[in-house]
Amino acid sequence: MLIFSFQETVIRKALPILEHIIKGISNHDLFLGQCFKIADLGCSSSKNTLLVVSNIMDIVIEVCKENRYKPPQFEVCLNDLFGNDFNTLFKLLPDFYAKLKKDKGKQFSPCFVSAVPGSFYCRLFPDQSLHLVHSSYSVHWLSQVPDGLESNALNIYMAKTSPPNVFEAYGEQFKTDFTKFLQIRAEEIVCGGRMVLTFVGRSVVDPSSDESCRLWELLAQSLLDMVKEV
Ligand SMILES: C[S@@+](CC[C@H](N)C(=O)[O-])C[C@H]1O[C@@H](n2cnc3c(N)ncnc32)[C@H](O)[C@@H]1O
């Protein structure tokens, strides 16, 4: 619960950026089309997922109102890994649809939610089919544990005691993954579409700073203590 509320804070803090990006779309054909297609990548299965969807819909509807356009219909594709609990999400949908209808009144636009299971490091959508890609607190997850971490034996991530090749391996894996992520999305997003990604970064250059690694060092230490007790 605590974790979900932290992620909710991240979503709320990023809201002005989302607003700025959607309001900055100068090609209004995107709003005038039959259907505004949104993908939320790494959506998980909490209330946060639908909070993001309703934030995006609110902003698009506001832009349409300001420009006296009829709001489009919305197609919302929720993506996460194959093992994600999509059933929990689906069970939230009846209340979500009912609330939309009640809150929007005359401004109501139909919204069609579906699930797209799979890794966002692979193709998920047809060519040039998405108007807006959103992802909150997910893209920092790598596609795999980097190769060559044998020398990092007592750690579970980068740590102050990790040898230099471990930092390089994580850096390279991120570079490979993120490049692939961007290349794939470039194929899936329509010309003039937008993408809003929120993910973990750090404010200092040193990748072994407490800000980046302390949490994982403590977790590794706890695991080692547990192993000693066996
Ligand atoms: C911390 S949760 C964030 C969930 C939600 N976006 C939020 O803000 O509450 C990260 C999510 O990313 C998903 N994820 C991690 N790697 C992924 C990948 N390669 N493809 C799709 N989803 C992924 C995880 O399964 C998890 O549900």
Image (tube, grey):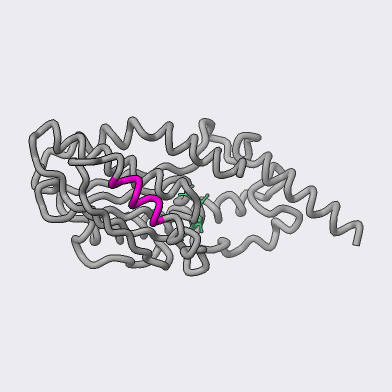
- Camera-side residue: 144 or 34? 34
Answer with left or right where residue 23 lies relative to residue 160: left
The residue drawn where x is 48% and y is 55% is 44
- Camera-side residue: 84 or 168? 84
What predominant SS class does the magenta segment belong to? helix
Answer with left or right where residue 41 lies relative to residue 5: left
Give the residue at the far right of this rendering.
229
The residue drawn where x is 42% and y is 42% is 198
- The quadrant in which the N terminus is found is top right
Q: How many marks?
A: 0
- Tell me where the magenta segment starts and ends, as one range: 93-101
x then y, percent, for residue 196:
33, 43
Please tell me whether residue 12 is drawn above or below residue 39 in the rendered image: above
Please tell me whether residue 172 is drawn above or below residue 213 in the rendered image: below
x then y, percent, for residue 101:
28, 47
Answer with left or right where residue 79 lies relative to residue 210: left
Q: Quadrant of residue 177?
A: bottom left
Answer with left or right where residue 40 lies relative to residue 44: left
x then y, percent, for residue 34:
12, 55
The residue drawn where x is 47% and y is 69% is 82
- Camera-side residue: 42 or 178? 42
- The quadrant in which the C terminus is found is bottom right
The residue drawn where x is 43% and y is 53% is 175
x then y, percent, for residue 99:
35, 45
